[in-house]
Image (tube, rainbow, N blue to C red):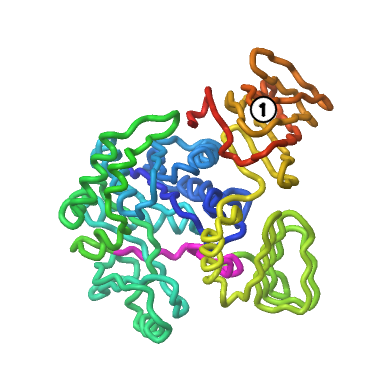
Amino acid sequence: MIIPVILSGGSGTRLWPLSRALYPKQLLSLTGKNTMLQDTVYRLASLEGCGPVYCVCNESHRFLVAEQLHETGVELGEIILEPVGRNTAPAAAISAMLVSKTYPGALMLVLPADHVILDSEAFSAAVSAGRAAAEKGELVTFGIRPNVPETGYGYIRVSKEGQSDKAVYPVLEFVEKPDKATAERYLASGDYFWNSGIFLFKAESYLLELETYAPSMLAACRDAIEKSVKDLDFLRLDAASFCASPSDSIDYAVMEKTALAALVPLDAGWNDVGAWSALWDVEKSDVSGNIKKGDVMVHDVKNCYIHATSRLVTAVGLEGHIIVETSDAVLVASRDSVQDVKVLVEELKRSERDEALTHRRVCRPWGTYETVDESERFKVKRITVNPGAALSLQKHNFRAEHWIVVKGRALVTVEEKKITLCEDQSTYIPVGAFHRLENREESPLELIEVQSGSYLGEDDIIRVDDRYGRQ
């Protein structure tokens, strides 16, 4: 049996402004109707002997991840919550411990949640090709044959002596991202592959190698599981124990040191979508080489990627540019400079700008809200509550709220009173009053919320009851 383990802890800063810390790229629909996380799940359908899916994610993404996984209909093993990011090796260690306990002897297929793989059948064939080696205890990784001297990827050198083109190759070394001249030499040799970050191995084999090469990591992860707690659909790792683990990749912690590393070539239209230029590479362009998303109009524009989400975006006389528009930010960059978007994001974080963290449209386990307008003493939100969902029973110390229903039917609790509001009806929530908003209907509830008061921050919420386990 193969147990897929999807790693969904990344933040995707190079895809800002679409990707934000609280809404990263793996949870976005970038190349089709499904999110990248969902596409990762769907490509497992053609894989034989596939068991329940395990997923490791950031605690702040848990409800979005759970909702998107449930939408796929996949059988779930565990959704494991990381209290902090510790790179891929501890995430794989936690998963391996859980998998080996429930499915002794099973193989683990470790998959990043944010990769594009265009050919699912070729992907499944590559996994099948590596299965026998993994069953024997080897740690299999999947390498991409380079077609250009790419400097943005790590490389893996293999031994091809006595091997056919479709063999599982012994790994000789992992090498860091090279400069241009070195990458050209790698490409010419034919002995190097790009490192995809996808792995196949027995859970027990990985844990044995960790015992040898990263024992402190193994101990911290074991302690984090022993002190973990179940929280709704999630396994919440112990924060202190997990924070004590070294922060290393699977490559650095194990694969660069083990004598059991093997590589299977993967020719399946792979791309890690590490920057906006990658989307220009993987999507189909028009006759001028442009890719246009949303409401876009251009004149004399060539080889550009233009993405509009909330308004008309126009461009004239450009070539080789990236333009991405959201409701609160616009990015304009040369295609050759998009790797440096992360520099802008770091500056936004240092300036404590909300645009680094979230969009105006914010997802919650009960639905969404979007800030329409705000000033020093008021804020206007558009709120959508999913069918059967409810906000927490809460109060605010500094703001009052007015709710106007524009679609659906709302059940409103204010202190001891319950009222039903239909379309075009409204109510008032005084400062300090306990209140709750519920949608008991089978269609979404939409309303406008007007806040007023001396402080309008999202941390002015005191919850006394919440079905989603939030504090």
* Vertical side of 444 occupied by 69: above or below: below
Expressed as whole percent of the image width and height from the top left, the position of residue 120 reads 49, 55
Q: Using the rendered view, name the quadrant where residue 455 is placed.
A: top right
- The residue that appears at 72% across and 36% down in the rendered structure is 452
Expressed as whole percent of the image width and height from the top left, the position of residue 454 reads 67, 39
Check residue 41 for magenta coloring.
no
The residue where tag 1 is placed is 431
Q: Using the rendered view, name the quadrant where residue 327 is placed.
A: bottom right
Q: Residue furthest left?
A: 212
Check residue 269 for magenta coloring.
yes
Q: Which segment is the magenta one?
A: 263-281
Q: Quadrant of the N terminus?
A: top left
Expressed as whole percent of the image width and height from the top left, the position of residue 357 reads 56, 52
- The residue that appears at 24% across and 67% down in the rendered structure is 170
- The residue that appears at 66% across and 19% down in the rendered structure is 413
Disc 1: CA contacts within 10 A as few (<14), some (14-19) or many (>=20): some
Expressed as whole percent of the image width and height from the top left, the position of residue 418 reads 69, 14
- The residue that appears at 59% across and 65% down in the rendered structure is 279
309 horizontally vs 363: left or right: right
Q: Nearer the viewer, residue 129 or 362?
A: 362
> Type of residue at label 1?
Val
* Vertical side of 368 occupied by 317: above or below: below
354 horizontally vs 447: left or right: left
Q: Nearer the viewer, residue 153 or 397?
A: 397
Determine whether the residue tagged by mark 1 lies in a helix, strand or loop: loop
Q: Residue furthest top?
A: 416
280 horizontally vs 46: left or right: right
Q: Residue furthest right?
A: 424
Q: Using the rendered view, name the quadrant where residue 352 is placed.
A: bottom right
